[in-house]
Amino acid sequence: MAPTTPVFDAAKVNVLFVLGGPGAGKGTQCARLVDDFNFCHLSAGDLLRAEQVREGSQYGDMIRTYIREGTIVPMEVTVKLLENAMLDAMKTKSGEEWSNGRGRFLIDGFPRKMDQALKFEEDVCEPSAVLFFATTEEVMAERLLERGKTSGREDDNLESIKKRFKTYENQTMPVIEHYRKFGKVAEVDSTVSIDDVHTATVEAVGKVLAQEHVTKNT
């Protein structure tokens, strides 16, 4: 079977995978990076949560079960939801970064397994880099339990949190190590204050985008 051509050209579209354990602060930092660099921020988790309640969704019940158990939704579903959201953004986003078929995406909380990473590269786009928010299990648990008081998310409880840590350690860390071998990981210590994390993140992302600019113009 002939290899598939990705939907997006990596020479024009920057994709940054944003990874880190649950509660590492990915969503908080992504929201700031949207303002800093005119990214489109796509959260795999948010897309899945929206899909599970979307009227007429063929995936809703299945997604709900996987999320409740703290396990990973089949990659074909997640990759397709991300692809559709990226296509929508390419039509609606504006600014110099989005002209002439260009775009830049922060994909938050994905890929969570090696096969997801490879499937996304094959079908959608090769990533420019992985932005990895490193923190400790203790800090993550404290943040998630605090968030659970107001988030309304059914997986922000101690039992689900423990399952999510285990899934992250066993399945997501190998993804980070894979991209590290190719020099594609920008690691940020997220145990410090939100503002300090933001400063370090802006510096890391600025370097990635500068490198991509040089590569694409040589």
Image: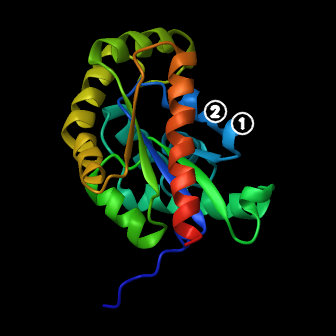
Residue 122 or residue 98, whichever sits in front: 98
Q: Amino acid at mark 1?
A: Asp
- Read off the residue under disc 2: 31
Give the residue at the far left of this rendering.
170
Residue 63 percent across, percent down from the top left: 43, 45
What colour scheme has been applied to the protein in the rendered image? rainbow
Residue contact at pointers 1 and 2, CB within 8 angstroms? yes
> Is 6 positioned to the left or the right of 66 in the image?
right
Residue 10 percent across, percent down from the top left: 52, 68
Q: Nearer the viewer, mark 1 or mark 2?
A: 1
Residue 95 location, quadrant: bottom right
Residue 50 percent across, percent down from the top left: 59, 43
Q: Is residue 39 above or below residue 139?
A: below
Task: Identify the disc placed on residue 35.
Answer: 1
Q: Evaluate whether residue 123 shows in this view.
A: yes
> Is 214 positioned to the left or the right of 88 in the image?
left
Residue shown at 52%/18% (left/top)?
196
Indicate the secondary structure of the residue bearing disc 2: helix
Residue shown at 54%/20% (left/top)?
152
Q: Is residue 146 above or below residue 161?
A: above
The Cα–Cα distance between marks 1 and 2, rounded to whole angstroms, is 7 Å
Q: Amino acid at mark 2?
A: Ala
Residue shown at 59%/70% (left/top)?
217
